[in-house]
Image (cartoon, rainbow, N blue to C red):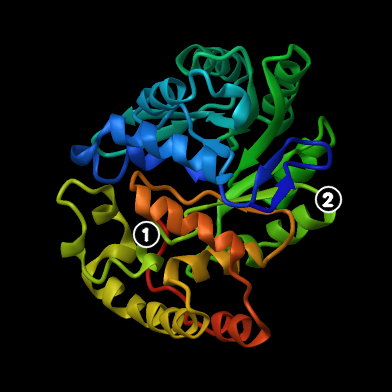
Amino acid sequence: MRGTTLGASGPEVGVVGLGCMGMSWAYDELGRDDTVSVEVIHRAVELGCTLIDTADMYGPFTNEELVGRALRGRRDEVVLATKGGLVVDDPKTYASHRDGRPEHLRGACEASLRRLGVDHVDLYQLHRVDPDVPVEESWGTMAELVWEGKVRAIGLSEASVEDIRRAQAVHPVASVQSELSLWSRDAIESGVLEFCREQGIAFIAFSPLGRGFLSGRISSADDLPEADGRHRLPRFQSEALAANLGILGELRKVADRLQATPAQVALAWVLAQGKNVVVIPGTKNMGYLEENAGAAGVELDDAALAALEDVPAAVGTRY
């Protein structure tokens, strides 16, 4: 698989990575199967999907434990990323709050290392900037973790250009993780993607398949498991979901012409936004993993790019 680096001097990763959240959090939690998930993580590494992404809030905590078990004996084969700075208040409703205090981030990182069973992570990310804590204070503590050898590089998640600029003045920002897909283009419209490109910062796109919608396998809320957290999201409400099928219709036309799947074309569009872009689609299904990995080899011609740029905007907010 072709690769890129996390920042100017960061580790090299395959352009398609693996988001592990859904293996134990937010989606079909009743269908959780850790044995299968471990096999999927192993296969991802074999396919070159070497960026493995998790966070302490997923579960909470159980996703890091799962990833840690999967990587025993294979730690050196991956670029391991986790996050801190979001604290779950109620796992049933996914209610959470931000905590960017230096003492919290230090404790959270050390706890993540214990759950993962490693002495360092390759990328530690501030899950959200805390409006009550100057970003320089949060970032300064994360920089100390780099100097102490507990973290190789540090990144931000869902940050503004101003947040990134302020953090960069304290310590190099290796990556920015934000949602980016054919139905979520906020990172383009806000200038974050362009800023990252200009600064040599890796852009890690989460939910690049629109939380599964752009795979073409969800046409109504009935296609989601009963306990699936997507039932709470505005874009998956019945009227919005029906309206958003127009996006999928245009995506399928391009996919049919290129002899690829809708998921592969959707991922290829995100990757086409810059050489610094990495996608981390999440899955716990072996077939979907292999399909996603194949997106790295899909080339979008000018006609495909033009058609995809013209797909209608999504109906409903992200959250």
Q: Is residue 114 left or right of residue 141?
A: left
Tell me where residue 319 sits by quadrant: bottom left
In the shown orientation, is residue 88 left or right of residue 124?
A: left
Query: What amino acid does circle 2 point to?
Result: Gln
55 with respect to 239 (left or right): right
How crowded pointer 1 is (Cα within 10 Å; few <14, some 14-19, many 20+) is rated as some
Residue 103 visible in image: yes
State the residue at coordinates (43%, 73%).
314
**Could you classify mark 2 by the number of other residues whose Cα lies within 10 Å: few (under 14), some (14-19), or many (20 or more)?**
some
The residue drawn where x is 40% and y is 67% is 214
Q: Nearer the viewer, mark 2 or mark 1?
A: 1
The structure residue drawn at horizontal position 81% and vertical position 35%, both measured from the top left corner, is 172
Q: What residue does disc 2 label?
A: 199
Q: What residue sits right under mark 1 in the picture?
A: 212
User: Percent from the top left, x then y, of residue 293?
Assistant: 51, 54
Foreground pick, 102 / 218: 218
Element under disc 1: loop
Residue 185 vertical placement versus 199 (above, below): below
Q: Which mark is residue 160?
A: none
Q: Measured along the vertical axis of the image, is residue 274 above or below residue 201?
A: below
What's under tag 1, amino acid-wise? Answer: Gly
**Which circle's residue, 2 or 1, is located before the other in the chain?**
2
Front one among 211 and 108: 211
Q: CA distance from mark 2 to mark 1?
A: 31 Å
Looking at the picture, tell me which residue is in the foreground, 288 or 220: 288
Would residue 126 be found to the left or right of residue 149 on screen?
Answer: left
